[in-house]
Image (cartoon, rainbow, N blue to C red):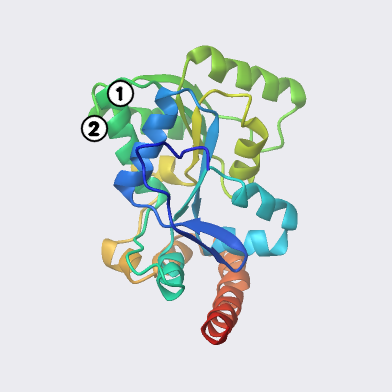
């Protein structure tokens, strides 16, 4: 783990259906990200949920991407419950949209420049306005809305140069799973910043997409809220992944109890 420093405790972790999940907290993850950013480390952070877990199960190549990350937070409550079931009793949720805010607050406080990569031009404008209103001291030095199609090599080199030249030390990547995790993996070593894959955080905080009420998040029902909001886009994902996750994790849990 590259975001491990001498003054910080070594994190507990477990493999849930083959994917590493670190037992971190908002304070711990933020401290590690800020320390890495101050040192200009090139690192990436994955906020993991059931969707990501099953993507890793279905693709050994993608599993290598996530399991090689510098930090993998338990974004979804099923993964928190998974950690607890596997012996990490104090595991708590660290979801991407909330982590985005705690990191931005800390970055503004210590004057670390940030960059945004993902979303549409309109969503970036709205998210930037939200951040500047919430954290007036925040320094947003680069904003890129890449095309939704695969970018060309020339485009990627231009975007990478733009990010590097901006001096950003924290980069929020919001282009969706598994694309954002693969992108961050490919750019570790090329961009001297801590990269966070934050999915729909740009749209959540700019108000373009509604976020589930806190009671639904705590009950592990955020997927149901999002399904109701975007049924045509998300129904295949949830009906494919959720039942398999429950079955595979129950098998893992039973095996762990009898081994």
- The residue identified by callout 2 is 134
Q: Is residue 49 above or below residue 121?
A: below
Residue at position x 56%, y 58% from top?
20
Q: Which quadrant of the structure image shows residue 85? A: bottom left
For residue 143, side relative to residue 93 (left or right): right
Local crowd size for mark 1, using a 10 Å CA cut-off: few (<14), some (14–19), many (≥20): many
Q: Secondary structure at mark 1?
A: loop
* Left or right position of 134 against 212: left
Q: Label 2: how many residues lie within 10 Å, few (<14), some (14-19) or many (20+)?
A: few
Q: Nearer the viewer, residue 71 or 128?
A: 71
Closer-to-camera residue (86/119): 86
The residues bearing labels 2 and 1 have C-alpha atoms spaced at a distance of 9 Å
Q: Quadrant of residue 158?
A: top right
Tell me the tag on residue 205: none
Q: Secondary structure at mark 2?
A: helix
Query: Looking at the image, which residue is at 55% across and 17% down?
Result: 164
Name the outermost residue toward the front. Answer: 6
Task: Residue 64: give x, y in percent of width and height.
Answer: 68, 51
The picture places residue 145, in percent across and down from the top left corner, at 55, 29
User: Which x, y percent locates residue 30?
Assistant: 35, 40
Q: Nearer the viewer, mark 2 or mark 1?
A: 1
Q: Residue furthest top?
A: 165
Quick check: 155 above or below 45? above
Q: Would you say residue 207 is visible in this rendering? A: no
Foreground of the two, 156 or 227: 156
Viewer-closest of 130 and 196: 196
Name the disc covering residue 138, or none.
1
């Amino acid at each position: 783990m590259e975001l491990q420093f001498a003054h910080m405790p070594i994190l507990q972790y477990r493999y849930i259906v083959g994917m590493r999940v670190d037992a971190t907290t908002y304070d711990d993850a933020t401290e590690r990200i800020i320390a890495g950013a101050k040192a200009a480390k090139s690192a990436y952070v994955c906020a993991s949920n059931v969707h990501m877990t099953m993507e890793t199960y279905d693709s050994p190549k993608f599993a290598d991407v996530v399991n090689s990350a510098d930090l993998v937070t338990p974004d979804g409550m099923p993964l928190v419950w998974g950690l607890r079931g596997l012996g990490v009793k104090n595991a708590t949720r660290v979801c991407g949209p909330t982590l985005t805010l705690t990191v931005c607050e800390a970055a503004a406080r210590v004057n670390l420049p940030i960059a945004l990569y993902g979303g549409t031009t309109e969503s970036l404008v709205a998210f930037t306005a939200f951040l500047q209103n919430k954290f007036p001291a925040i320094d947003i030095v680069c904003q890129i809305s890449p095309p939704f199609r695969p970018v060309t090599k020339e485009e990627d080199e231009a975007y990478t140069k733009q990010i590097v030249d901006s001096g950003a030390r924290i980069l929020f990547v919001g282009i969706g799973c598994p694309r954002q995790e693969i992108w961050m993996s490919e750019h570790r070593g090329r961009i001297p910043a801590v990269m966070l894959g934050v999915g729909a955080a740009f749209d959540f905080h700019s108000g373009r997409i509604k976020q589930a009420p806190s009671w639904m998040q705590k009950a592990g029902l955020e997927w149901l809220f999002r399904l109701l909001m975007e049924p045509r886009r998300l129904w295949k994902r949830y009906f494919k992944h959720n039942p398999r996750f429950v079955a595979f994790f129950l098998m893992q849990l039973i095996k762990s109890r009898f081994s």
